Image (tube, grey):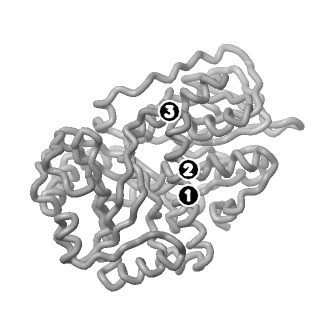
């Protein structure tokens, strides 16, 4: 069985924009498939799209329905900058591995952009630079070292002094790093487009279906469901986000709570280039603009997963985020029109876990944790696709379960 979570509360801003409907059917009898994908969020969409592009027979199930879990709660800053700065990550896993993880993250953003164009997904995709502002985790000196480390790894990064930051972006901070080629998207439209592409290629979608048991057989995996019918698959991909299947070991990752707001549209008040902005601080603040000029701002994360306690703080946290937004961007009206809370997973390294479940070589776990969930989901789709084709992804070892 899965460990269940109330993944979000409140009204995420993305619910204000209509996304294509993902059609599902009821599961009324036992069925067979090449690959069963568990989860109809953005991770499941990327997996299903990638595998159907290879001509595989794919079934996708979800205990709720399509794009109902944590996907609508994401603020969708699709960037290659991992939660852990390159210099910090190098201290945790070594310089070579840290550089490889960052480079793969950058490649994933580029590949996702190309995929959106190839499939023709209308998801308000826009290129955006990102600004990492000096804070209590990385001050100006540490930011300068971070810029040098990124450039040495072949990653574009420009160090901005306080004066240059103010002149170019109108932000008053001691220093910042600016990085190009990230993406702003509407996550519901992106997920719907990916699922739609998979369905157009013959993927079968069933919901609500809760996968409860996973039994290995000579030819694959027999998956029991709460509804009764069973699903036989040669391979299973668990794209259940932060609701872990019981066969996935919990070591190395944890669930935290987060909060976010979105303002009214105010296009004329936005900062130059509508860059993503985030702080090298703890607690940190991050913000972006939507295509129609709303400002999404979030942060104030806390290390607990009690949904009741999380939801009780929506008012207090929204006010705090709004106050911080006004201080950072005085021209913006920070009054929330939308406010929501959610749960998300994190690891000590900030990297996802993309690996076969222990003692289950036909079951692949996809856990795109941290603030780069969409980017990591793209990496997962590439790794799983390669492994099911009999190959070995060169970077797969970076994302294994912790020992």
Query: Which numbered dot is residue 107?
Result: 1
Q: Residue 95 in the image: x percent, y percent?
A: 58, 79
Residue drawn at x 51%, y 37% as measured from the top left: 41
Q: Using the numbered discs, state the Cα–Cα distance from disc 2 to disc 1 in whole angstroms.
A: 6 Å
The quarter of the image holding the N terminus is top right
Left/right placement of residue 169 relative to residue 223 reads: left
Residue at the disc numbered 3: 120
Residue at the disc numbered 2: 111
Circle 1/circle 3 CB separation < 8 Å: no
Q: Residue 174 in the image: x percent, y percent?
A: 22, 78
Residue drawn at x 33%, y 39% as measured from the top left: 9
Q: Residue 341 in the image: x percent, y percent?
A: 32, 45
The quarter of the image holding the C terminus is bottom right
- For this rendering, which residue is in front, 216 or 105? 105
Q: Using the numbered discs, state the Cα–Cα distance from disc 1 to disc 3 in whole angstroms.
A: 20 Å
The residue carrying pointer 1 sits among few (fewer than 14), some (14 to 19) or many (20 or more) residues within 10 Å by Cα, namely some
Circle 2/circle 3 CB separation < 8 Å: no
Task: Give above or below for 5 relative to 96.
Answer: above
Circle 2/circle 1 CB separation < 8 Å: yes
Left/right placement of residue 91 relative to residue 220 reads: left
């Amino acid at each position: 069985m899965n460990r269940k979570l109330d993944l979000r509360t409140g009204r995420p801003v993305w619910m204000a924009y209509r996304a294509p409907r993902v059609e599902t059917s009821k599961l009324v009898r036992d069925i067979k498939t090449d690959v069963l994908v568990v989860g109809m969020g953005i991770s499941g969409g990327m997996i299903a799209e990638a595998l159907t592009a290879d001509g595989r027979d794919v079934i996708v199930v979800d205990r709720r329905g399509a794009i109902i879990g944590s996907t609508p709660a994401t603020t969708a800053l699709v960037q290659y900058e991992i939660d852990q700065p390159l210099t910090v990550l190098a201290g945790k896993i070594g310089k070579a591995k840290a550089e490889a993880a960052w480079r793969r993250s950058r490649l994933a953003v580029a590949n996702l952009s190309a995929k959106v164009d190839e499939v023709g997904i209308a998801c308000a995709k826009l290129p955006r630079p990102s600004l990492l502002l000096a804070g209590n985790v990385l001050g100006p000196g540490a930011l300068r070292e971070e810029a040098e480390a990124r450039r040495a790894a072949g990653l574009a990064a420009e160090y901005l002094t306080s004066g240059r930051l103010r002149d170019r972006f109108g932000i008053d901070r001691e220093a910042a790093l600016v990085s190009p080629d990230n993406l702003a998207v509407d996550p519901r439209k992106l997920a719907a487009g990916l699922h739609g592409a998979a369905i157009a290629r013959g993927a079968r979608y069933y919901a609500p279906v809760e996968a409860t048991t996973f039994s290995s057989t000579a030819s694959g995996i027999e998956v029991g469901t709460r509804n009764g019918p069973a699903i036989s698959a040669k391979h299973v991909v668990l794209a259940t986000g932060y609701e872990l299947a019981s066969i996935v070991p919990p070591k190395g990752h944890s669930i935290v709570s987060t909060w976010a707001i979105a303002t009214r549209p105010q296009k004329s008040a936005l900062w130059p280039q509508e860059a993503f902005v985030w702080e090298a601080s703890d607690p940190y603040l991050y913000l972006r603009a939507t295509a129609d000029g709303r400002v999404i701002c979030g942060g104030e994360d806390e290390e607990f997963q009690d949904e009741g306690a999380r939801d009780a703080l929506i008012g207090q946290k929204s006010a705090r985020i709004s106050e911080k937004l006004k201080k950072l961007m005085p021209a913006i009206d920070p009054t929330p029109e939308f406010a929501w809370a959610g749960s998300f997973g994190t690891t000590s390294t900030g990297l996802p876990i993309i690996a076969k479940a222990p003692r289950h070589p036909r079951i692949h776990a996809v856990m795109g944790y941290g603030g780069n969930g969409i980017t990591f989901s793209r990496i997962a789709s590439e790794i799983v696709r390669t492994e099911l084709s009999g190959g070995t992804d060169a970077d797969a070892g970076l994302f294994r379960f912790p020992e």
